[in-house]
Amino acid sequence: QVQLVESGGGLVQPGGSLRLSCAGSGSRLSTYAMGWYRQAPGKERELVAQISILSTIRSTTNYADSVKGRFTIFRDNAKNTVYLQMNNLKVEDTAVYYCNGRNGLVESWGQGTQVTVSS
C-alpha cells in the first residue's frame, strides 16, 4: 500500500498561487488513480481534482466546477509525485487539502496540508 505525504500549503492572498505536492512511497503512483480533496471547517470533504491511472497514452483529468480553469493536477513519475497547481486562489478555496490514491480496493490518504487564502 502506498504512503502519501502532502506539502506546499500555506497562507496566500486572493489571486495568488500555490503548488501542492503529494509524494508517494512504497509503490508507484503511476499505478494509482490520484485525487485531491479538500475539507473546509464545518463542511464535508469534497473532490477537487483527479487524474486517472497512467495509461500507455496519457492520463485523463477531471475537476470540480468551482476550480476548473484555475487548478491543474499532474504527475511527475520520475519523482513519484502528484501535484496540484492552484492559480487565482479565492477565499473560498481555504481548506485542508488531502491527497488520495486508489488502486482497485486499495486506498490511501495523506495527512493533509492547510491552505488559507486571505488578505
Image (spheres, helix red, strand yellow):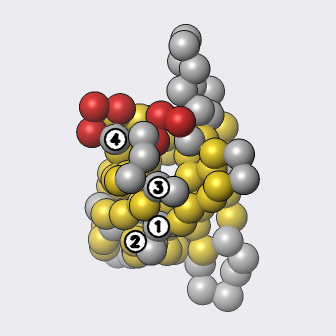
> Can you tell which mark lies on residue 80?
4
Q: Are marks 2 and 1 in contact (CB under 8 Å)?
A: yes
Disc number placed over residue 113 in the picture, else none: 2
Picture residue at 40% right of the left edge, 71% below the top: 113
What residue is shown with label 1? 110
Q: Which of the marked residues, 3 or 4, is nearer the chain's N terminus?
A: 3
Q: CA distance from mark 3 to mark 2?
A: 18 Å
| Location of mark 3 (residue) | 2
Side of 10 where 54 appears, left or right: right
Distance, label 2 to label 1, CA atoms, is: 9 Å
The residue shown at (72%, 76%) is 44
Can see residue 87? no
Disc 4 marks a residue whose amino acid type is Asn
Residue type at mark 3 is: Val
Q: Nearer the viewer, mark 2 or mark 1?
A: 1
| Nearer mark to the viewer, of 4 and 2 | 4
**Residue 56 appears in the picture as rendered:** yes
Vertical position of residue 92 compared to residue 60: above or below = below
On screen, residue 88 above or below 33: below
The disc, 4 or 2, on the residue closer to the chain's N-terminal end is: 4
Answer whether labels 4 and 2 touch (C-beta < 8 Å): no
Of callouts 4 and 1, the N-terminal one:
4
Separation of residues labelled 4 and 2 (CA atoms): 18 Å
Query: Counting other residues with Cα less than 10 Å from the Cα at mark 3, is it few (<14), some (14-19), or many (20 or more)?
Result: some
Considering the numbered disc 4 on the image, is that residue within a helix, a strand or a loop?
loop
